[in-house]
Image: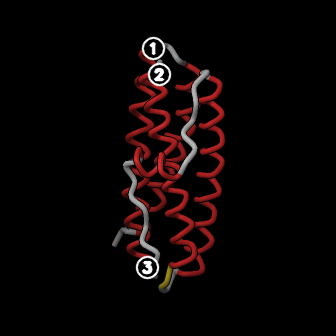
Amino acid sequence: MEDLVKSLNCFLSDLNVFYRKLQNYHWNIKGKEFFEMHIKLEEYYDEINDEIDELAEHILMLNAEPLGTMKDYLDNSCIKEAKNEKIDTCQVINNIITDYNTLLKKANEIKEKADNIKAYGTSSLIDNYILLYMKNLWMLNQLNMK
């Protein structure tokens, strides 16, 4: 169970850094698709915020402690912060696709660990994230089709 909790806390860190990144992009995006992406980015970070709360509470349900500081998140995340600068919509889309792929990979790894130790509550929770990330990736990839 300790290894699963560690993975969940790393995932929680990824979500928190991704949340800040999405909000940063929301404030700093520029380009032809500004209006559409500005709205979509807010939708994404609202979804991620809900996942952060749900995942932290799940870690508590496992009688463990969720990470809670920005330092912890930055030290344990595979997702890198966005720079505080104006950014083109195309770059934002590509970066978000990369980050959702990272989250999807981590979610799949956590699901496998949870199933292996019969932590079916964790496995079930992660199923929801896997489906959401797959759908978001499918939609984002449609923007990149030429």
* SS assignment at label 3: strand
Compared to residue 30, the image places residue 13 above or below, namely above
Of residues 139 and 120, which is closer to you in this image? 120
Q: Residue furthest left?
A: 146
* CA gap, disc 1 and disc 2: 5 Å
> What residue sits 62% from the left and 30% below the top?
58
* SS assignment at label 1: loop
Amino acid on which the number 3 mark rests in the picture: Ile
* CA gap, disc 1 and disc 3: 43 Å
> What residue sits 44% from the left and 30% below the top?
6
Q: Residue furthest top?
A: 118
Q: Which residue is mark 1?
A: 117
Q: Which residue is mark 3?
A: 87
Residues at discs 1 and 2 in contact (Cβ within 8 Å): yes
Q: Residue 117's image quarter?
A: top left
Q: Which residue is mark 2?
A: 114
Q: Residue furthest bottom?
A: 32
Which quadrant, please, contains the C terminus?
Answer: bottom left
Compared to residue 36, the image places residue 20 above or below, namely above
Of residues 131 and 79, which is closer to you in this image? 79
| Residue 72 x %, y % | 48, 45
| Residue 85 x %, y % | 45, 79
